Image (cartoon, helix red, strand yellow):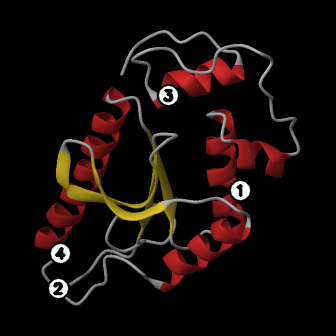
Amino acid sequence: MLAQRSRDTVPGLARRRALHALGVRYRVDLPLPMMRRCRADVTFVRWRTAEFLLGCYWHACPQRHHAPVFNGDWWREKLEGDVRQDADTDSHLVRLRWVPLRLWEHEAVDAAVGKVVEVLASGGHPRALRIRGEVVPTNTGRRLWVHRASSREMIFQVMGRACTTLL
């Protein structure tokens, strides 16, 4: 298990290349807020989106997982623990108002990148909106920055939405 790479895998690099080619910028292998041991594969900090690339074997993919025969009970418990840890991480991120995005390694690169672009566009990412073909809002003379406002509030103001809570 120690020999398994945690970053820069072939599917991960392919997806990152595709995102970069579209002009979307990101951070790689970033520790999650208040969970230093857990790291997201690709993170869009300003848009509070964390993408996780899940291996079919290690995260018990419902489509392609094959249960090991030798020492099956131990492996079943271990893989169920991995799935529980993924769910705990997702709930923690949701509580912090982040969007966890879990993609399987067997998904096609174009489909996975499309999901990422959709999530970013729903959060107001200007490049993702252009990729989807939507009109990006421009400054209409309103003040874009409020004293002690976070970057997330600024995004809501630019998009014309009402901000409900502080970070």
- Label 4, label 1: how many angstroms apart (C-alpha)? 36 Å
Nearer to the camera, 103 or 27: 27
Q: Give the residue number, with chain letter if any, for mark 3.
A: 152
Report helix, strand or loop for mark 4.
helix
Is 157 rendered above or below residue 22? above
Label 4 with label 2: CB-CB less than 8 Å:
no
Among numbered discs 2 and 3, the one appearing first in the sequence? 2
Nearer to the camera, 123 or 69: 123
Residue 54 falls in which quadrant of the image?
bottom left
Residue 48 can be seen, yes or no: yes
Look at discs 4 and 2 and give the one toward the viewer.
2
Instruction: Categorize mark 1 by other alpha carbons within 10 Å: few (<14), some (14-19), many (20+).
Output: some
Q: Give the residue number, with chain letter if any, for mark 4.
A: 72
Instruction: Categorize mark 4 by other alpha carbons within 10 Å: few (<14), some (14-19), many (20+).
Output: few
Q: Amino acid at mark 3?
A: Arg
Label 4 with label 3: CB-CB less than 8 Å:
no
